[in-house]
Amino acid sequence: MTKNYAGIDLGSNSCKIIICDENKNNLCIKNTSTRLAEGMYKNNRITDEAIERCQKCFYDYRQLLDEHNVDSENVRAITTAACRTAENGADLVKLIYAESGIKLEIINGKEEAELNLKGAIEHVLNKSEYVVVFDLGGASTEVTLATNSKTPEIISTVSIPWGARNSSEAFNLVEYDEERANMLRKEVDAYMDEFFDKIGCSQIDNAVFVATSSTPLRLASMINQFGQYDRDKADGIIMEREAMDKAISSILKAKRATLAKNPYIGDKRSYIFISAAVIFKQIYDRLGVDKITASLKSAKDGIVADLIERDKNKRG
């Protein structure tokens, strides 16, 4: 009988699930807006409203797992920065398990980076000696340099404790302000300094760059004028630096109401997209990139790859 596998990634903005068979054929992919970290910065607690959204999401995902006959040992569900830092993060994990039977693991920044790397590297595998993957989430951003192979070796990784949502709330960047944006840039730079301390210039010079999460996918949709945000169509698209600079410049000049009407951003993202753009550009400026591949593949894809590999190793 064919086995099915599932990876679930509860991030600070959304929760993602992928279900595939042992040949890595996708059976189900879904992305649910849970806005886990919304309103969390002030009291360092996940709000009741966010908890309710997560409960609904995991109820739905339980149905998907059952519909696709995914056994419990073939499911891995992770949660990242918001639950790592929130005072009631562990309480949410217990609640989700009690209600859905899905066991959530709170993973650290290094493991988050490893899973993102395994998922995103498929786009650029063996196209260079090294690869840099950065994942801009809602409450943290991971930047990782690794060898570019089927079994990548991490050379340097850093978890920046700022993402689109918590930085928007902390620095009041719903709309652009140069002084507040520069404060955020300085925060990002301090962690990028740590990243660069562990690498050599030749490694960066011989690397390709991949960016995961919705920010690069939305930028790719915008740059290529899809007419609306289309994450599947944007997956794997290579963006040139000049085009990214132009798109981000127009975003930073826009009022929130304008961003809300933008078909590539929308109302929910309009509150956090300025800070996302600031972080994203600061990282690719520091890396000195000419082009970046936008990737829909991320931690959830790395999870199912690990699960499938586990069973292959068991069979010998």
Image: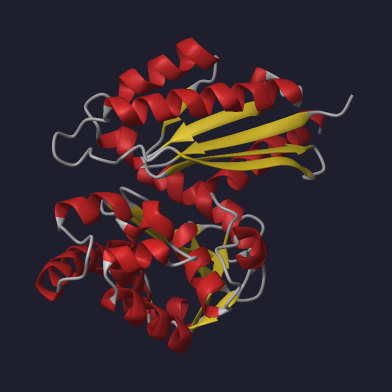
* 219 or 227: nearer the viewer: 227
Q: Which residue is drawn at 26% across and 24% down?
A: 88
* 23 or 37: nearer the viewer: 37
Where does residue 1 sit, x and y in percent of width and height? 89, 24
* 16 or 259: nearer the viewer: 259
The image quadrant that residue 184 belongs to is bottom left
Give left or right: position of 33 versus 158.
right
User: Vertical placement of 246 versus 255: above or below?
Assistant: below
The image quadrant that residue 75 belongs to is top right
| Residue sitting farthest toward the right | 1
Colour option used = secondary structure
Give left or right: position of 211 versus 307.
left
The image quadrant that residue 16 belongs to is top right
User: Vertical placement of 21 versus 255: above or below?
Assistant: above
Give left or right: position of 218 versus 60.
left
Does any portion of residue 136 appear in the rendered image? no
Q: Which residue is drawn at 18% across and 69% down?
A: 181
Name the quadrant of the C terminus: top right
Where does residue 110 sit, x and y in percent of width and height? 40, 47
Give left or right: position of 115 versus 73.
left
Q: Residue at x 65, y 22 (%)?
A: 63
| Residue sitting farthest toward the left | 179
Does any portion of residue 301 appear in the rendered image? yes
| Residue sitting farthest toward the bottom | 242
Marks counted in the figure total 0
Where does residue 129 sit, x and y in percent of width and height? 58, 74
Q: Residue at x 38, y 55 (%)?
A: 267
Where does residue 3 sit, x and y in percent of width and height? 80, 28
